[in-house]
Image (tube, rainbow, N blue to C red):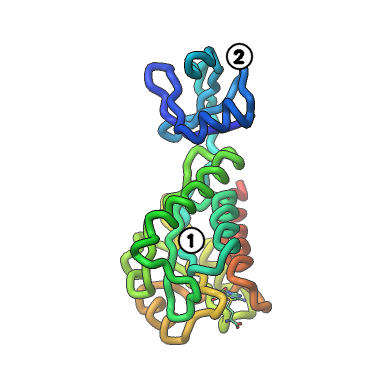
Amino acid sequence: MQRYFGQIITNQVLLGDDDIFHLTKVMRARVGDEIEVVSNEKVFLCKVSKLKPHIEIDAIKQIKENHELKNHVILVAALIKGEKMDFVLQKATELGVGEIILLQTERTIVKIKPAEKDLKLERYRRILKEAAEQCKRTRIPLLYRVIDMNSLKDIDAQVKMIAYEEESGATESFNSIIRSIKDKQKVAIVIGPEGGFSEKEVDSAVAAGYKRVSLGKRILRAETASFYALSVISNHLERK
Ligand code: SAM
């Protein structure tokens, strides 16, 4: 069943124009069709009650479910080129991330100029919303920050890791930090760009309280490293 993020006010469903277009023109909704709508992180079963002169959708009942991770996980992802960035946003959403912070480092090839930031973040947020609808989440990951390495210290998390490719080898440090995550603790994992981190950058992250971790013996592409790290974290958090 198709899921949308919207608002429900006195049992009436309010959806954005894009979603109305998708529902009426792409899904060709008919009166009586049912959809799921997430409003304030609660899921409702809703039914199309009218199509003309404009669509009306009624909330029928709340659906009790929770597909969110129990800890807030923050992916601090260095900007990478083109579609790979889109892919990281989509997969991070599917893997339960709570927030994505974009990172500009010494070696990031992609730079977001201030003039283009709003448009770019808007496009990225559409990817997050679509991914959250597809994987049946009740929350769309936050994305509003583009930072540099100096701002890592300002990230509010109790478990902080930086994946460093020069650390490659046994994953014990990564695993033991993940096993130490306690309820309600926020977790931040930093992943570098195609060109990796400089030693100086890693030292500054360590000084800001981030632990260097290895993601194994092989050098992963930046996008693979994000998926790998988030898969291990979410797998651990959902092991029971
Ligand atoms: N420039 C590096 C090289 O070619 O040796 C590769 C950087 S890698 C493409 C991009 C990012 O993925 C790294 O900065 C790191 O955050 C992460 N990464 C990749 N493989 C890793 C590993 N085995 N252990 C820890 N982090 C890794």
| Residue at 42% from the left image edge and 81% from the top image edge | 201
Q: CA distance from mark 2 to mark 1?
A: 40 Å
Sort mark 2 into few (<14), some (14-19) or many (20+) by Cα contacts within 10 Å.
few
**Residue drawn at (55%, 68%), measured in percent from left and top?**
81
Provide the residue designation for mark 2: 32
Asked whether the residues under the numbered discs 2 and 1 touch, taking CB atoms below 8 Å apart as contact, a structural biologist would say no
Residue nearer the viewer, 29 or 34: 29
Image location of residue 130, percent across then percent down: 55, 43
Earlier in the chain: of badge 2 and badge 1, it is 2
Image location of residue 55, percent across then percent down:
50, 19
Q: In which of the image's four quarters is ligand 1 placed?
A: bottom right
The correct choice, above or below, for 6 with respect to 94 in the image is above
* Whole-percent x, y for residue 89 in the image: 54, 56
Query: Would you identify the image quadrant in which residue 210 lies?
Result: bottom left
238 shown above or below 50: below
Q: Which residue is mark 1?
A: 75
Callout 1 amino acid: Leu
Ligand 1 closer than 8 Å to the CB at disc 2?
no
- Is 55 placed above or below 144 here? above
On-image quarter of the N terminus: top right
Q: Secondary structure at mark 2?
A: loop
Name of the residue lying farthest toward the right: 218
The residue lying toward the viewer, choosing from 165 and 100, is 100
Residue 157, visible in the rendered structure: no
Which residue does the image show at 43% across and 18% down from the upper left? Answer: 12
Percent of width and height locating residue 177: 51, 66
